[in-house]
Amino acid sequence: MRCRLLLVLAVLFLGCVSPQGRLSAFNDNWVGRPFDDFVRTYGAPATEYTMSDGNKLYNFSAGGCVLRIEADLRGSILGIQIQRDPVGLVVLSRCFEVLPSD
């Protein structure tokens, strides 16, 4: 347990971004792009839901970290949210292991 704590502190001091920062960068890369491109890159969503305004919500389960993506009627990504983020192997967020840093 002590080794894990030291490793987490070392990672934090090396300038790692927060899960929210990682998600923000991920959003910057994907918002406005076609949802089909996301599917080509990461595979099909686990679930989808059509909202009353016609937008769709898609849930992806990537290694336990559930992402929710909203797309408009044209299929453009409006936003990505973290719905569930279990503890990772090294740090307290699985997002570091699932979401690309760039």
Image (tube, grey):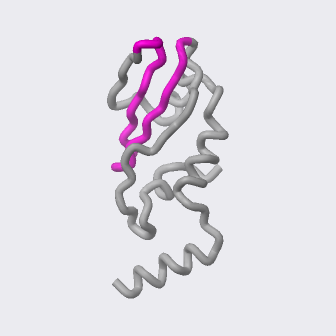
Count the labels in the image: 0
Q: Residue at x 60, y 62 (%)?
A: 17
At a point 57% along the width and 73% down the height, the residue shown is 12
What residue appears at the point 57 percent right and 13 percent down from the top-left corner?
A: 74
Per the image, is 58 magenta?
yes
- When the figure is inspected, residue 4 is found, relative to residue 96, above or below; the finding is below
x 54%, y 18%: residue: 72
**Looking at the picture, how far across and down is residue 48, in whole percent?**
36, 24
Horizontal side, residue 57 vs residue 73: left or right: left
* Residue 76 locus on image (x, y percent): 59, 21
x then y, percent, for residue 15: 65, 70
Would you identify the image quadrant in which residue 16 lies? Answer: bottom right
> Which residue is nearer to you in this view: 2 or 21?
21
Please give the range of residues in magenta.
Answer: 52-73
Name of the residue lying farthest toward the front:
52
Residue 82: x percent and y percent?
45, 45
Q: Is residue 13 above or below residue 69?
A: below
The N terminus lies in which quarter of the figure?
bottom left
Residue 79, above or below 53: below
Pick out the residue farthest to the bottom.
2
Q: Is the stretch drawn in magenta largely helix, strand or loop?
A: strand
Q: Does 2 appear in magenta?
A: no
